[in-house]
Amino acid sequence: MEPVASGSIVTLRDVAAASGVSISTASRALDERTASRSAAAAHVRKVAEELGYRRNSFASGLRRGETRTLGVLVPRLSDTVMALMFEELERAASSRGYFAMVATSGDDPNDERRAAETLLDRNVDGLILATARLDDELPRRLRERKVAHALVLRTDGVSPSALGDDEVGGYLAVRHLIDLGHSDIAVVTGPTFTSTGIARMAGARRALAEAHLDAREEWIITGGYGIENGFSAGEELLGRESRPTAIFAANDNIAMGIMAAAHRHELKIGADLALVGYNDTPLAARLPTPLTSVHVPLDQIARTAIDLIVEPGAEPQVRMSMPSLIPRESSGAPLVHGGGK
Amino acid sequence: MEPVASGSIVTLRDVAAASGVSISTASRALDERTASRSAAAAHVRKVAEELGYRRNSFASGLRRGETRTLGVLVPRLSDTVMALMFEELERAASSRGYFAMVATSGDDPNDERRAAETLLDRNVDGLILATARLDDELPRRLRERKVAHALVLRTDGVSPSALGDDEVGGYLAVRHLIDLGHSDIAVVTGPTFTSTGIARMAGARRALAEAHLDAREEWIITGGYGIENGFSAGEELLGRESRPTAIFAANDNIAMGIMAAAHRHELKIGADLALVGYNDTPLAARLPTPLTSVHVPLDQIARTAIDLIVEPGAEPQVRMSMPSLIPRESSGAPLVHGGGK
DNA sequence: CTGTTAGCGCGTTCAA
DNA sequence: TTGAACGCGCTAACAG
């Protein structure tokens, strides 16, 4: 295969020659890290521009040892939350002069390790892990190898992490349902190997306890984060004669699945069944019955994560952002018990 | 910032020394392109493995001139279709020994150009463009600069392209509605600056013409590909006293928006209004009323695109994959006219 | 601020 | 098949 810029390979030597200076002067003039102000430097930059000079990233990287590139590891990009997270990371990285490079790792720890190696082989300056498993070995290994890294959307309590406060988010969601007058509340949460699943559940339980409501264990369902998990949980909850009047779903996918199950049981979301999701996916606001959801400030989390890598410091290495509840039509007061605040 | 592998930088020299051979022998032994068979080579590989040697991609790239990396340009990854497309490209690239690197370019041609430069600066061996605009200058420029590239999901008729046959897809969708007995059919399509929008519309018109149905121009709506566009189109179509009994939406987002509008007008999708989407997004099958949609073989398109770059040949440079219609509950026979096939 | 010099790690000559 | 030598393009250390 042809090198990509075949034909037009303008090198630093060319720029130096055309500018009438030495190569190293040209190099310095074009060094974006030190704003060299001299008139000669300006001239070099002009010449470089005219010649269409582009620094060879290999040679530069080989010499400098850094790439201003961060690697991002996500399980999959077809998960909207992951896609949004990456877009924000890309933006935050860019604003600090970094480029973000993604690799998808699926759910298998081996694939994850391989993907991490792939990124490291490309000399990324650091790694951002958006993969979810709590029992993941990778952060520990990265610490041992002293690879700069940060976790996003979850934490293992040790590696630098940027995430939303999921416990508070879970609390807000269930508290909202309680405030609407509900007391028959079910919770459908994610896998137990994710910190998000655990924390959101904990917050939900705190809200229930605070209102002196028992958490009925048959109304607490733990499963995956996919729509189909929400659907089967919904079938289970809504198929019984005694069903909850409100459900907190630990993400919007689960909520979507519950919506489908509710539809099958001819329950109207908002009227017959109050529903709260999590993540405030763009879709949530635009559903036939707009979904109440807990908003997570992904932009802020992204900036924090980039900072944790780019400016490692002594400050708290686990930084939480506050989620907020966005009420929409999917959550109304219960019909029967006649509550409403 | 620390170089990422600080402390454990095993170089080719180390491997050579530990193996008792020269650097160049070690280099050859580890060259993945030529399966070097000698016993000494095997020994070198074993030593390299043990030492945890990893080739320095900068030095290698500097010398070889190629990176086995392809750059992918998408407008945004939060668009599920784009995310799926990238995942498939990543997979197809990987199976051919390439790594896929993505950059998002938004909708602005300038940003697109910048993003392309960013990828080229990283010495990608080729570029895959999933950006949509027909009036885009980039492909032409890439041809002029002789940059290996391919377009996916659309074509300009000149640059190598891999895409679904959108005209056929549009035809299949509307033909399906006609076969169900509908004659009052509306079409909501994407922007006119996208080849997908134009071709899907053309296919729809062909199906209508073939069935001797007039395309009522007030039932032909052109807009964006977002949910909100679908919603406003739905409001427009369903708000009038004379409304269509079936709608073909040129993507699943538009269909979702129409679903929301139908809900507002208390029309039941499937019974009161038949609806067909496009792309067969994972969500489509899992909606409360599962959405009939035109499936596009993204995996095949991805493989084709990679091939077009990796093995450029004289074969047709614009290659189309066949879409297929996936019927679901959202499309039923019309109520009033009592059709049914 | 400038130019000279050295070398990053690797792949590929070339001669043995 | 092997090893010695060279240089890819750039940046950093050094001296002026």
Image (spheres, coloured by chain):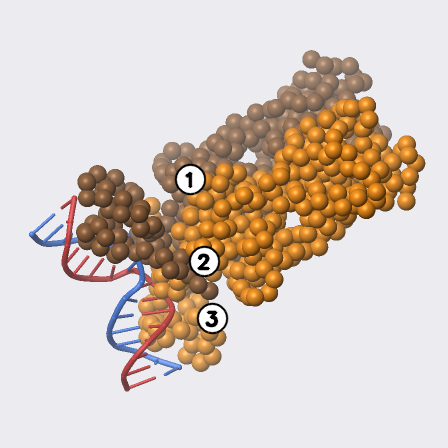
Chain colours: A brown, B orange, C red, D blue
Q: Amino acid at mark 3?
A: Arg
Same subunit: marks 1 and 2: no
A47 left or right of B38? left
Are the residues flagged by discs 2 and 3 in contact, CB closer than 8 Å? no
For marks 1 and 2, give the one nearer the viewer: 2
The residue tagged with tag 1: helix, strand or loop?
helix
**CA separation, marks 1 and 3?**
35 Å
Are the residues flagged by discs 1 and 3 in contact, CB closer than 8 Å? no
Residue B25 vs residue B299, the one in the foreground:
B299
The tag on residue B33 is 3
Report which residue position mark 2 lands on: B146
Q: Amino acid at mark 2?
A: Lys
B92 left or right of A91? right
Report which residue position mark 1 lands on: A94
The tag on residue B55 is none
Q: Quadrant of residue A190?
A: top right
